[in-house]
Image (tube, rainbow, N blue to C red):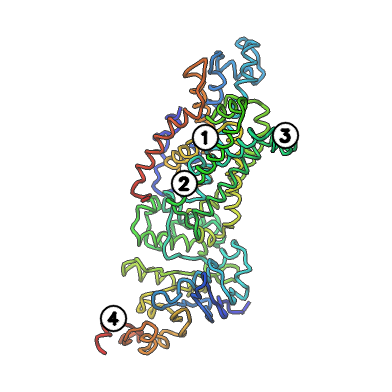
C-alpha cells in the first residue's frame, strides 16, 4: 500500500434551506499533514467541516482514502475520523471518565487489553487533565470541558494509522476557549497526530498559531475557498487583507521565518 | 426498604476517585434484585387475609410442610395476589424504563411519558376501545381480541411520542420549554377527545372508565398479563440494545453519530419501545404517574447516568416501588383499597417539585 491517503473534496457545496452557505470547494487534506481552515466569521468554515464530518448533506464529492464518505456506515466512519465539535453540551451528570470513555464506543481506538482500559486516563493526561477523571463534567470550566472532549475524540482514533489506514481528526476551533499554554499543548497534539501519519483538519481563528503549526492553510471567504497552500504562500498582506476585509500587514518572525499577523498592523497603513 | 437499597455505606467504600461508577452500579443492581424479590414476597403475604412470607414462599415452591397455607389462603395468593404482584412488577418496570429511555432520547431528566402527553395519548386509545369497542370498533375488537386494548393504547402512545419528538426537536437539539409545552398541548388535546368519548359512554362503560382511569392494579388477572405482558417484555428487551446509543445521545445527535452510533435507528427503536411499554401499561392499569420520573432520577444520583446500568436498575427499582405502593394502596384503608395512582402521585408529585427546585438554575425555562 503506497497510495497516499487523504480526505478529498471535489466541488463541494452546502445548501441550508434556500441559502447556499458553501459552494465549489476543492480541497485535498492529506494524511501526515495539518490542514487549517481559516476565514472570517460566517465564511462557511464550520459548515464545510460539518459537511466533511457527515452532519450536513452536500453536493459534490467528499472522499476518504478514495471512498465516498456519504456511502460509509456510521461505524465505518467512526473508525476513520473523529470530530471535535465547537461547543459540546452534555445533558446528564457524567463524570469526566465516563465522557472520555464514550469515545471508545466504536471500538476502533487501535488498542486492546490493559492498554485499552488505561487509554481514557492516558488521553486525559495527554490533554493535561490527569487526576480529573472523577470530577463531574458539568463542574469544569469551559476550557477544561473542551479538553475533556478532545480526550474523548483522541480515544476514538488513538493510533493515527490503523491497519495501514490513516485516520483523521476534524477539529472545530480546538483552541477557542483555551489559555495560551493549552493552546500550544493542544496544537502540539494535533501536530504530533499528523507527524505520526494521521491527518488533521482544523478550523482556526488564530492566524499565528495556524502559521506555527499548519502544513497547509485553506482560506475561506463568503462560502468559497479563496486560497490554499503553505502558510508562507497564503499568509500574505494582499490575501489576508482581502479575505478578512481589513488592512493587515504580515510580519515574519526573525529566526523561524514563520509569518505572523498582529492586529496593530492595521495602524501602520 | 428504599433506604436499605440506597446505601451510602456501600458506595463510600468504592470511593469514586477515578470516576468509574460501573462497580457501584453492578452492586446496586444486585441489591435491587434482592430487594425486588423481597418486595414480591412481601406483597404476596400482605393484605386483608394474612399469610406469612415464609408460608407463601414454601407454597409457591411446592414445598408444603407444617406451615403450609390453608386452601383458602392458597387460592387468594395464587389467583388474586400473584397475578397482581406479577403485573405490578411488569408495570413498574415498564413505566420506570420508558421514563429513563425517554429522558435519554430527549436528553432531559424531565421527560416522562405521564408529563408530556404520551400516557394521555395511550389513554385516548384505550378509552376509544372501551367506549366504541361494541359499536364502531367492533370489527377490530373481533380481530385482535384481548390485544385490542393494549394495541390501541400503543398506537395512541406512538402517535403522541412521534408528534412530540417532531415538535420539540430541531437539528438534534431538544428544547425543554418546547417539549413541556408541546406535551401539555398534546395531553390536553388527547384528554379533550377522551372527555368526548366519556360523555358518549353508557353507565356500565362509565364504571369501567372511572376505575381504570385512576390507575389501579386491582383488576389484575392472568388474562390481562397475557395481553400486556409480552408487549412489555419485548419493549423492555430492547433496552440493552439502545443503552449505548442513548449514552452517546447525551452528547447530542451529531456527536453520537460521529461516535459511530446509528442515531436514526436508536431513536426509532426508543420511540416504538416507549410507546409499546407505556401503551400496554396504560391499557391494563390506567394512568399511574411519576414512577417514570422518580425512579431514573433517584438511580442517576446513586449510580450515574450510564444507561447500560440505569435501564436494568430502573426496571428493578420501578417494579419494587410499584409493588410497595400497591401494598400501601391495598392495606392503608383495608378492607377497601385506594387506586395506586393516588399513592404514586402523592409521593411522586412533591418529588418532581424537588427536582425542579434543585435544577432551577440549570433548566432556565
Left or right position of B144 against A214: right
Q: CA distance from mark 2 to mark 3?
A: 40 Å
Secondary structure category for the residue under label 1:
helix
> Is the residue at mark 4 from the same chain as the one at mark 3?
no
Image quarter of the N terminus of chain A:
bottom right
Disc number placed over residue A263 in the picture, else none: 4
Picture coordinates of residue A59, whole percent (x, y): 58, 75
Residue B326 point in image, percent of width and height: 52, 25
Disc 1: CA contacts within 10 A as few (<14), some (14-19) or many (>=20): many
> How far is the residue under mark 4 from the one under mark 3?
77 Å
Q: Which residue is mark 1?
A: B318
Horizontal and vertical percent position of residue B335: 52, 15
Tell us which disc is closer to us: 1 or 3. Answer: 3
> Image quarter for residue B68?
top right
Q: Chain of mark 2?
A: B
Q: Are marks 1 and 4 on the same chain?
A: no
- Specify the label residue B145 is tagged with: 3
Badges 2 and 3, same chain: yes
Q: Residues within 10 Å of mark 4 (few under 14, many from 20)?
A: few
Chain holding disc 1: B
Q: Residue at x 39, y 77 (%)?
A: A40
Amino acid at each position: 500500500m503506497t497510495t497516499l491517503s487523504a480526505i478529498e473534496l471535489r466541488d463541494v457545496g452546502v445548501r441550508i434551506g434556500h441559502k447556499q452557505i458553501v459552494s465549489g470547494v476543492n480541497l485535498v487534506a492529506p494524511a501526515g499533514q495539518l490542514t487549517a481552515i481559516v476565514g472570517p466569521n460566517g465564511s462557511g468554515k464550520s459548515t464545510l467541516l460539518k459537511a466533511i464530518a457527515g452532519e450536513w448533506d452536500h453536493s459534490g464529492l467528499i472522499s476518504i482514502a478514495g471512498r465516498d464518505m456519504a456511502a460509509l456506515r456510521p461505524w465505518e466512519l467512526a473508525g476513520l475520523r473523529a470530530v471535535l465539535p465547537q461547543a459540546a453540551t452534555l445533558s446528564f451528570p457524567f463524570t469526566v471518565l465516563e465522557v472520555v470513555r464514550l469515545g471508545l464506543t466504536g471500538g476502533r481506538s487501535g488498542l486492546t487489553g490493559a492498554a485499552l482500559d488505561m487509554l481514557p486516563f492516558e488521553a486525559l493526561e495527554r490533554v493535561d487533565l490527569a487526576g480529573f477523571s472523577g470530577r463531574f463534567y458539568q463542574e469544569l470550566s469551559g476550557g477544561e470541558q473542551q479538553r475533556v472532549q478532545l480526550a474523548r475524540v483522541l480515544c476514538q482514533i488513538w493510533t493515527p494509522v490503523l491497519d495501514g489506514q490513516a485516520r483523521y481528526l476534524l477539529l472545530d476551533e480546538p483552541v477557542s476557549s483555551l489559555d495560551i499554554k493549552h493552546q500550544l499543548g493542544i496544537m502540539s497534539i494535533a501536530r504530533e497526530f499528523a507527524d505520526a501519519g494521521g491527518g488533521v483538519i482544523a478550523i482556526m481563528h488564530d492566524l499565528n498559531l495556524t502559521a506555527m503549526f499548519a502544513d497547509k492553510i485553506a482560506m475561506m471567504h463568503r462560502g468559497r475557498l479563496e486560497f490554499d497552500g503553505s502558510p508562507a504562500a497564503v499568509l500574505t498582506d494582499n490575501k489576508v487583507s482581502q479575505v478578512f476585509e481589513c488592512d493587515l500587514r504580515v510580519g515574519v518572525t526573525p529566526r523561524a521565518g514563520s509569518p505572523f499577523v498582529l492586529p496593530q498592523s492595521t495602524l501602520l497603513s | 426498604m428504599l433506604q436499605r437499597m440506597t446505601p451510602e455505606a456501600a458506595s463510600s467504600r468504592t470511593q469514586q476517585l477515578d470516576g468509574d461508577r460501573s462497580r457501584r452500579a453492578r452492586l446496586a443492581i444486585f441489591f435491587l434484585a434482592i430487594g425486588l424479590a423481597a418486595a414480591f414476597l412481601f406483597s404476596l403475604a400482605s393484605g386483608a387475609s394474612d399469610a406469612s412470607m415464609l408460608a407463601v414462599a414454601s407454597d409457591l415452591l411446592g414445598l408444603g410442610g407444617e406451615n403450609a397455607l390453608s386452601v383458602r389462603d392458597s387460592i387468594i395468593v395464587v389467583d388474586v395476589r400473584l397475578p397482581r404482584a406479577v403485573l405490578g412488577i411488569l408495570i413498574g418496570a415498564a413505566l420506570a424504563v420508558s421514563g429513563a429511555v425517554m429522558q435519554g432520547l430527549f436528553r432531559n431528566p424531565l421527560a416522562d411519558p405521564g408529563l408530556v402527553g404520551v400516557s394521555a395519548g395511550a389513554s385516548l386509545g384505550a378509552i376509544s376501545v372501551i367506549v366504541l369497542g361494541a359499536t364502531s370498533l367492533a370489527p377490530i375488537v373481533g380481530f385482535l381480541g384481548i390485544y385490542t386494548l393494549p394495541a390501541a393504547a400503543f398506537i395512541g402512545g406512538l402517535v403522541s411520542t412521534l408528534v412530540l419528538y417532531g415538535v420539540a426537536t430541531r437539528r438534534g437539539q431538544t428544547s425543554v420549554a418546547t417539549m413541556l409545552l408541546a406535551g401539555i398541548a398534546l395531553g390536553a388535546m388527547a384528554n379533550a377527545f377522551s372527555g368526548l368519548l366519556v360523555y358518549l359512554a353508557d353507565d356500565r362503560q362509565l364504571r369501567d372508565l372511572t376505575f381504570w382511569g385512576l390507575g389501579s392494579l386491582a383488576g389484575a388477572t392472568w388474562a390481562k398479563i397475557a395481553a400486556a405482558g409480552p408487549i412489555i417484555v419485548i419493549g423492555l428487551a430492547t433496552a440493552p440494545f439502545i443503552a449505548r446509543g442513548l449514552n452517546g445521545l447525551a452528547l447530542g445527535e451529531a456527536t453520537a453519530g460521529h461516535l459511530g452510533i446509528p442515531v436514526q435507528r436508536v431513536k426509532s427503536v426508543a420511540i416504538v419501545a416507549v410507546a409499546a411499554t407505556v401503551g400496554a401499561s396504560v391499557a391494563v392499569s390506567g394512568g399511574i404517574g411519576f414512577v417514570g420520573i422518580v425512579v431514573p432520577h433517584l438511580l442517576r444520583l446513586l449510580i450515574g447516568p450510564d444507561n447500560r446500568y440505569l435501564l436494568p436498575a430502573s426496571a428493578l427499582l420501578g417494579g419494587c416501588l410499584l409493588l410497595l405502593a400497591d401494598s400501601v394502596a391495598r392495606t392503608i384503608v383495608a378492607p377497601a383499597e385506594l387506586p395506586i395512582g393516588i399513592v404514586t402521585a402523592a409521593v411522586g408529585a412533591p418529588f418532581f417539585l424537588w427536582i425542579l427546585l434543585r435544577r432551577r438554575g440549570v433548566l432556565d425555562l
